[in-house]
Image: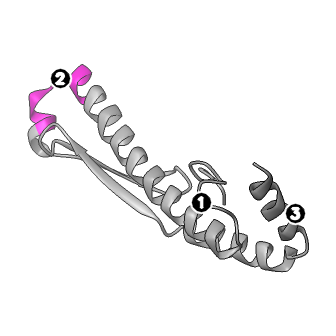
Amino acid sequence: MFEKLGSMMSLLGNRGKIQEELQKFQAQVGTITAEAAAGAGYVTVKVNGRMEILNVRISDEAMALNDREMLEDLVAAATNQALAKVREQLAVESAKMAQNIGLPPGMLGNGFPGIG
């Protein structure tokens, strides 16, 4: 516990590096994207690291089924899968940032979802 506290205290003298790494991370968040499909490709959703939906594609086959409830479920499923993928990428990138500024592994938890 005191090791982590010591690491945090040493960072106080290194604010410039922290700000630089945080700015790099924030810039990278916008470039991170993930895509997921549901219903054997009936619906595909693409999201970015800012947790914004970039694109939703619904196949002609899904539209032909004329099943609104199923389509709504597929959109939700694909969106949740894409968001989970992007959260994983954010966790990896935030761990790299933490390492670059000298924080011990795991100090930032699961990253900074939504930073940007």
Residue at image location 66% in from the left, 60% down from the top: 116
Out of 49 and 97, give the one closest to the viewer.
97
Q: Quadrant for residue 39, please give it.
A: top left
How is the model colour-coded? one colour
User: x, y (%) of residue 82?
Assistant: 36, 48
Circle 1 — which element?
Answer: loop
Out of 2 and 107, give the one closest to the viewer.
2
Mark 3 or mark 1, earlier in chain: 3
Mark 3 or mark 2, earlier in chain: 3
User: x, y (%) of residue 107?
Assistant: 66, 54
Between the residue at mark 3 and the residue at mark 2, the CA separation in whole angstroms equals 58 Å
User: At label 2, which amino acid type do we have?
Assistant: Asp
Q: Was residue 67 drawn as part of the magenta stretch in this picture?
A: yes
Residue at image location 78% in from the left, 64% down from the top: 7
**Magenta stretch?**
62-71
User: x, y (%) of residue 64?
Assistant: 9, 34
| Left or right position of 17 against 42 | right
Between the residue at mark 3 and the residue at mark 1, the CA separation in whole angstroms equals 16 Å
| Left or right position of 97 against 65 | right
Circle 3 — which element?
Answer: helix
The residue to which callout 2 is attached is 67
Q: Give the residue furthest to the top.
A: 69
User: At label 3, which amino acid type do we have?
Assistant: Met
Query: Would you place residue 65 above or below residue 108 in this image?
Result: above
User: At label 1, which amino acid type do we have?
Assistant: Pro
The residue to which callout 1 is attached is 105
Q: Which mark is residue 9?
A: 3
